[in-house]
Image: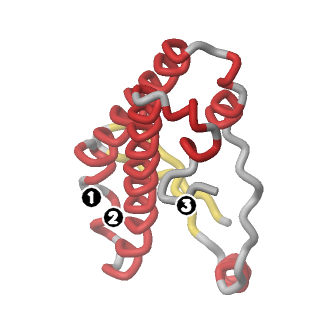
Amino acid sequence: MEANRRHLSTRKAAKEYNITEAGRTELRRWLGQPRPEPPTRSPFLIQLFFSGELTDDEVLTVLEEKARELRGTLELYESGSVTRPTFSKEMSKREQFFWYLTLDFGIESLRFTLRWIEGVVDRLHRKEHERGMNGALTGRSEE
């Protein structure tokens, strides 16, 4: 990796990094191999796991706050500066495509999580917890 200083008209000098030929070779090697995902560790899911200790109102408060947080992040992703190309104008269409796929993944992940939380809130209002695991496992047959 090589670093150079570049002066931009709107802000202080920024370091610009360029990949060396050896670095590009290593990057291509790394990109060409599947990587295992690390285990998911979510403080929110740990809270939810132990939420049987709370009242319904307390759980709903936690869920509704999490939903508000997700809506704010989703709004930022969908309408904020992250969706408007800036430096990506200098990139090839192929590079733009792959860079913005990661943004699309983030948006879809947020949408899924938000929908899921809204469904949990609805199940709590309907007292689905009285059905035990069958109230939690949506779309599965009751056994």
Residue 141 marker: 3
Position of residue 136 in the picture relative to residue 49 (left or right): left
- Point 45% across, 63% down: residue: 102
Instruction: Please identify the quarter of the rendering in which residue 18 is found.
Output: bottom right
Q: Is residue 139 left or right of residue 83?
A: right
Tell how many labels.
3
Residue type, numbered disc 2: Ser
Q: Which is more foreground, mark 1 or mark 3?
A: 3
Label 1 sits on residue: 85
Check contact, mark 1 vs mark 3: CB within 8 A.
Answer: no
Residue in the image at 38% along x and 45% along y: 115
Residue type, label 1: Pro
Could you say which disc has been placed on residue 20 in the image? none
When the figure is inspected, residue 48 is found, relative to residue 105, above or below; the finding is above
Q: Earlier in the sequence, mark 2 or mark 3?
A: 2
Give the percent coordinates (x, y) of residue 135.
54, 42
Chosen colour scheme: secondary structure
Q: Residues within 10 Å of mark 3 (few under 14, many from 20)?
A: few
Q: Secondary structure at mark 2?
A: helix
Viewer-proximal residue, 129 or 57? 129
The residue located at (69%, 33%) in the rendering is 49
Q: Is residue 120 above or below residue 32?
A: above
Tell me the element at label 1: loop
Rounded to the nearest angstrom, the CA distance separating label 2 from label 1 is 5 Å
Circle 2 sits on which residue? 88
**What amino acid is labelled 3 in the image?**
Ser
Q: Is residue 87 above or below residue 119?
A: below
Circle 2 residues within 10 Å: few <14, some 14–19, many ≥20 = some
Dot 1 surroundings within 10 Å: few (below 14), some, or many (20 or more)? few
Q: For this rendering, which residue is in front, 119 or 24?
A: 119
